[in-house]
Amino acid sequence: MSSTKVCRLAQCRRAVIQDSPSAMDGYPQDSLEHNVPFIVASGLNSTEWHQQVENQGILIKSDLPPLDGDKAIALQEYLGQVDDRGKSWTCVSREEPFRFRVKTGGRSFLLPPRRAQLPDGTEPLDTTPILHSPFSPLSPSSALYPDGLIDSQWIRKHQHQVPSIYACFYLLADDERLKADISNIKSSLARSGYKTRFAVILLGDLDGDSTRLSERVQDRLESIRRGTALDPKSIFYIAGEGSDAKLNEAMDNVLAALYKMAIEYYRDLGRHARKKRSRGLAPKPTVPPTSGTSRTLSLPDWNFRYDFKTAVLAEFRQELDAAIRSFEQAYEVLLGQDVLDVMPSWSPRWNEARLLSDIISMRSLRIHFWMGHTSMAARRWQTHRERIGDFVERRGRGTNNYGWQAWEARWATAMANLMERVGIAGLEPETTTLFLQPEKALLGERLKPWELLHHTGYWYKLAAQHLVARRTLAHAISDDDRRPPDSSPASQVASKAYTFDTYLCPDPHEEYPLVGGGVNHGKLIIDSLGAAREQFLARNQLLSVAEVSLDCAREMVALELWDNALDMLQPIWVDGFFRHEGWHEASEELCWLMRQAAAGTDRGELVVAIDWELLDTRFAPRANWHYDVSKSLDGLRLDTKPVVSLTDKSSRLFLSAGFAFGQKQSKAGEECTAQLVLVSRALLQSTPVTLCRVRVEFQGVIKPIVIEHVAAADAGASEGGDGQELAVVALKEEVAAGSGDDLPVVLQGQCDLTMRPGRRRILEMNVALREDGDAQASRAILSYKSKAYDVDYVIHFDETAPATGWYVAGATRACQLRSKTLSLQVEPRRPKMQMRVDKLEQYYTDERIDVEVELANDEDESATVQVDVHLSGEQRAMVRVVVAEGNEHCADEEEEAERRICGIRLGSIGKGCSSSFVLSIDGVAAPTKHTVQVRATYHVDSDAATTIVQKLSMQLDVVAPFEANYDMAPRIHAEAWPSLFDAASIEGAQAGAAMGITQLWCLTCNYVSFASEHLRVVDTQVEVVRCSGGQGARCDIGKLDEVADEGLVVGPRGMVSTRFDVVARKMSLGDRQAVVLQLQFVVQWRREEKGDVNASRLAVGEYMVLGSEPRVLASLGHGGEALRDGRTAADGVMELRVAIENPSTHLLTFGLTMEPGQGFAFSGAKHTTVHLLPLSRRFVYWRLVPLVRGAAVRPRLVVRDKYFEKVLRIQATEGLTTDKEGLVVWVRDDF
């Protein structure tokens, strides 16, 4: 089942009974209580205990006032929590240090009397009478006298009246009465005859000096212990300081120590009980019985008492093995031939013995659960049921009466209650476990299924079954037995006593009286079924939930709990549990129950839905029912007219529908034959149902089909065999008002839609196909209207179901066309509209793309055309469509990667004519691929409803026309550097002028054409993208190589070089930070034949200029050439000029060394020193006379920073090159 069904069931949680039914209420109080050690905490408040033990109680009293204050309140709260834990039925684990039942109160406590007194009026005896406990069957004042076995009063005595430990709380103060009070209480406990242990718990005095008390506390405690002769293990001290958490921790330690003492107390009592049993003697009563049967307890009876006491005392000690052995031994003695077999069934002691057997069995089951013996517990439950049944059948009143069924229900409920209160590990609802595997001790045995412990839902369900049997047997009681005893003869009263088993259940006149309600059996059954349903639902056992809900709702309907019954049944009806499993009888009962509940609550919609479902032939007809859907709401009080919506997923009505296309494929513009088959599976005695409308909906290109009802006289039908009626329906296309595409929105027809019981109606129609694509019949909506209500029934067509056959008039059966008749493939009508494209072979970045698309009409008549354009690609580009007369259509700018232009109307194109439009795509900066799809939708004038589509797809590759590399070389700027010491020049500068140092660079751009054709370069430029850093700088670009006016033609793979001067100047002379220079190279070009000029921008990169480090620049002048400083070099002589720049604010000193070489001679200083002021530049000159021609010479010039002893790299400028060895001068042959 799906998770949706689970959620729907879980939402309907309107519980009739809030709590689970309990079987413990019928047993005496305290008889099934979990027994743990009982202690009394005295002196924590002023409350005094009053026990109903007549006036013979033993009073334990103290004259000291009780404790008060915050600590006393905290102790009471803590001990209250301990007492709450002691009430739990969970097992006491080894990790749990203690578990107690605690009573807190004042300074006095009343113990029950140790010995009972003789009753008044007793005649004098020859010997001194031996007095016994007031709870013993030997005492005449006991309710068990003279032949009662044992009752819950003995258990209550040890669990609530006689503590194992009497703990007194005192303040450790200088009170001389403390020792006397402790001694007095010890004496009182000793005189009582009980073996109750005594403990003293002393608290530090918060009102005194805590330092002084801490020094004296040990001596004070020792003095109290010796003065009262207390055992060192019985006196405890708790410091008065600290928080409540520390107080609780201290009390944990105290109770853990007291727990061992309490266990020893109960061990002594158990030892005493075993010692009595070993004597083998039956004690005599205080006074011999003189009335009734004068029967006293035999030795087996006393052995049972001792075994029962031993088992309970072992449970006090949490010794589970010993307890289960003693309980089983007591059980066998009780059901043996010497105890229960000798009791007369009419005696009240018979029921008391049965009660004891139940109590022992439940206590044994609980111990099995604690020990993890789940399968042994299930077997033990079944064993007790069988043995008690055998006893009742042999010695009692038999098992064929309501009393036995009442006990069976109670026994099953008791098992569920035990499991819930103990908490069985592994059967929690969240585990979804249905039953537990057997324990290791039983793994080798062949267990029966019911010997595996199942969750409580099964036990509650079993109890409900016995409650139903109890009700059946109770209703079979004769009228004479149902009369109360005061109105019946004595003989009949006596007869009833021997006929009916009234163990833990009412007498016949109370169970099912002639007058009055008696026992509400339906309420009891609902309680049990409701508890079982919750357990099944928590474990997703949905079919079990449905079954139990049906049983529960049956009882609710009998009690006229209409709303509760609907809450139970409606989720099952909607999800169709019984319907899907084919359980027709259960489904029918579900529907009739729901109809009763829905009619009782005036739920018109639900009544209509159920009445329509009950017409189906899978349900048996019910006598005296009209089976007319028009009368469904008769007798209901409704304010509005119901409108009911049903679907085959939630309801299964008597109507079904099928659809079939006559062929698998067809073409747009043609017609396809189809059949709609409507079948009525209504009961033959039902009245015909006339539908007002049938609507068939499709997925795909076919519009809905709507068939309206008309009388049979207006729409004829041909009769076929096997109850068939074949009708041909003419469909008309309806177009929505204001629609511009002339496509139909619905196909409409008319036919007689009267559905007669057991008949099949076939509606054959021709469906016009206007669009191409796939179509599939998805669902049919059957509509019914009457004066009382309206119904819409949705039937979904299932592809996996057997295909609907094709019916022919006169044939008895349908012929099978193919496996899938719901789908139809509509092929497009072959378009004759031709599309031609005029485009170039290659497109480039930064170039606008214009593509002309021509549409030529080769149809036989004029056509109205509409165009859609779809552009996609890696780069986003704006697209426009320009049609005739200058109309322009643009794509939406909000779209991201894809651009669409839809609904471009080209108007009517005549036969043999053409129309064109231009697709324009803006240039993109990076290479990409554009995918262009053009979709022309048109229709010819004679068939405006049939759409014809012609598609064109093309890919436009866009590549980069140029790629380049760059070289940024330094140059010596001719202008002098500004002086840091020339204040007049700085102050006289204009505002905004660049006053910092200047550097000259030469940028060489080598660009290569990657185009597949010749391109004409019109111009080249270098643009400054960013010039940032420090306090600002200015950058000027100068072109060294000009392009001719007609441009430069560059062929494929052709390379061209061009140079630019880059002058960078800082705005401030005091700016020391470097400047980042980012440039881009711009190539303006166009195609050689025609076209607009395009600008391609290539990133040059970033360069660091105007730094603060010194640099050395070298240039060379040849003979006869004018140098930058205005001088002229002599012929045959070269002038080497070295510029040393100091852009820092420090005084720098450099040493220059020129080494002689074999290939040249030089004139100038061989060793010299140059001092540079901050922000200054100095020039040093050498004249070189080369001794070779057509070869390279290497001037060995070294520039060294004398302070850092660092050799500076010499950067070559005009006329020089460098390699790893230094400067290189090339001497021409003609020099």
Image: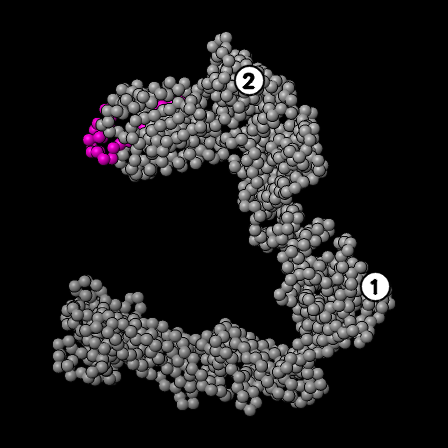
Q: Is residue 532 visible?
A: no
Tell whether label 2 touches label 1 (CB within 8 Å). no
Q: Quadrant of residue 433?
A: top right
Q: Is residue 736 above or below residue 1112?
A: below
Query: Which structural element holds mark 2?
Result: helix
Q: Quadrant of residue 82?
A: top left
Front position in the image: 559 or 564: 559
Q: Is residue 837 above or below residue 389?
A: below
The image shows residue 255 at horizontal and vertical percentages of 37, 30
The image shows residue 165 at horizontal and vertical percentages of 39, 25
The image shows residue 251 at horizontal and vertical percentages of 35, 32
Q: Is residue 593 magenta?
A: no
Q: Is residue 1050 above or below residue 722?
A: below
Query: Which structural element holds mark 1?
Result: loop
| Label 1 CA crowd tier, 10 Å (few <14, some 14–19, many 20+) | some
Looking at the rendered structure, which numbered label has been put on residue 830?
A: none
| Residue type indicated by callout 2 | Trp
Q: Nearer the viewer, mark 1 or mark 2?
A: 2
At 80% from the left and 76% from the top, the residue drawn is: 714
Front position in the image: 436 or 396: 396
The image shows residue 907 at horizontal and vertical percentages of 62, 87
Cα–Cα gap, marks 1 and 2? 85 Å
| Residue type indicated by callout 1 | Gly
**Residue tagged 2:** 302
At 39% from the left and 26% from the top, the residue drawn is: 110
Residue range corresponding to the magenta coloring: 195-220
Front position in the image: 1098 or 648: 648
At 33% from the left and 34% from the top, the residue drawn is: 45
At 67% from the left and 59% from the top, the residue drawn is: 607
Front position in the image: 241 or 1014: 241
**Residue tagged 1:** 723
